[in-house]
Amino acid sequence: MSARSACQSVTVVRRQVTMFLPRPLAERVDGIRTRFDPETARHIRPHITVVHDAGEALLGGLRSQLEFVASTRPPLSLRLTTARCWGAPEAGIYLAIEDGQGAIGAIRRALGVIDAPEFEYVPHVTLTHARTVSAPQAREAWDAIRGWTVDETVSIDRLAIVELDGSEWRTRATVAMGRVLEDPATPLRVTDRVAARVLLVDDDGALLLLRGCDPARPEAGTWWFTPGGGLDDGETVEAAARRELREETGFAVADLGPVVFRRTAHFDFEGVRYRQAEHFFCARSRRFAIDDSGWSDVERRSVLEHRWWTHAELVATSETLHPGELAQILDDVLARGPDSGGDRASG
């Protein structure tokens, strides 16, 4: 039985599109949540849910769709008003949101959300949840919260995809709203660069990946990626791939052979939006613990760990991988042979 056929069972994923409140307003709201619903406060930060059930969409496809929708819209201007309850306190207490321009509704429609006739979407920040707070506790909370007013307008410039992992909601991706509020006609500036990456495979067919984050956006969560990086001035893509592999893992190779895969990646990192043309090579090695003595300052603050991933793990994981189709890419490369040439391209 192949690793692919062994991983055909379907896992139902609870996935949502949401917007996190900016600090220090989030800390102010969390003062209420921590007091009256500590369980919910532990599992997710104060937020406004945009799409309640996005679990049927594949993460990579949902992120691409969200990036496109966000790129055409300015940051949202929302007013946080007063505490309310859903008919009765035990049904849940929330902080009401005024969206005068209907921006959240427009995002929901652009994402293809179709509400049932009996459902009315109401933007809000949950203060107490019916699943985590008993009826007597909810009534006590309402006696204390009733009349609490924030009366503050906030700018929300990012949308996030979150997934339920056990009892914790974890951020899987974050996308920026693509145009500045002051001048909606001005596109966000994009920095173009060329990068080289390496699919480093051990004797058992496992792939070495690094786990990273954006230090400027901790709310964006973490993701796994292959060793590699941008070209230095005058450097070829193969020379860059060999250098990056040596600097990031300590593994030196004299010849990487041809490019086996190409793609264009769009991402934000430390306040810069990149459009990156990536060239992938493939190399084989015995499994080893990486040597990080050659890491740059950027790598030391953004790379968290490394591990070797089997094919089955790549297929089954709900964690964010870059590229998202790594398992299929690795299949194709190893089927052709890393020295066969004839690279595959992806948008």
Image: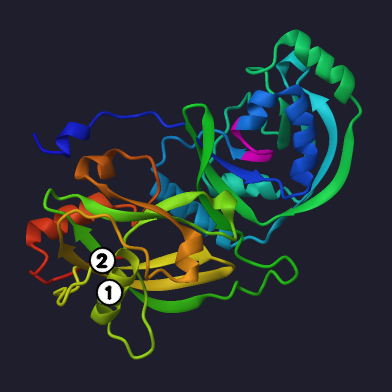
Q: In which quarter of the image is residue 187?
A: bottom right
Give the labeled residue for mark 1: 241
Query: Looking at the picture, how far across and down is residue 299, in whole percent?
Result: 45, 65
Query: Looking at the picture, how far across and down is residue 312, in whole percent?
Result: 22, 40
Q: Residue at x 72, y 50 (%)?
A: 22
Query: Looking at the picture, how far across and down is residue 153, in whole percent?
Result: 83, 50
**Depth order, front residue of 272/117:** 272
Q: Residues within 10 Å of mark 2 (few under 14, many from 20)?
A: many
Which element carries disc 2, helix, strand or loop?
strand
Q: Residue at x 23, y 61 (%)?
A: 199
Q: Which residue is drawn at 79% across and 30% down?
A: 32
For the view shown, which residue lies furthest in the front direction? 293
The reply to whether residue 347 is in sight is: no
Q: In this view, does 267 lie above or below 16?
A: below
**Depth order, front residue of 81/290:** 290
Distance, label 1 to label 2, CA atoms, is: 6 Å
Which element carries disc 1, helix, strand or loop?
helix
Q: Is residue 150 above or below residue 196?
A: above
Q: Residue at x 74, y 29 (%)?
A: 33
Q: Give the range drawn in magenta.
A: 43-49
**Depth order, front residue of 194/67:** 194
Disc marking residue 198: 2
Q: Quadrant of residue 254?
A: bottom left
Q: Is residue 148 above or below residue 154?
A: above
Magenta segment: does it hold 184?
A: no
Q: Which colour scheme is used?
A: rainbow
Q: How crowded is mark 1: few (under 14 residues within 10 Å), some or many (20 or more)?
A: many
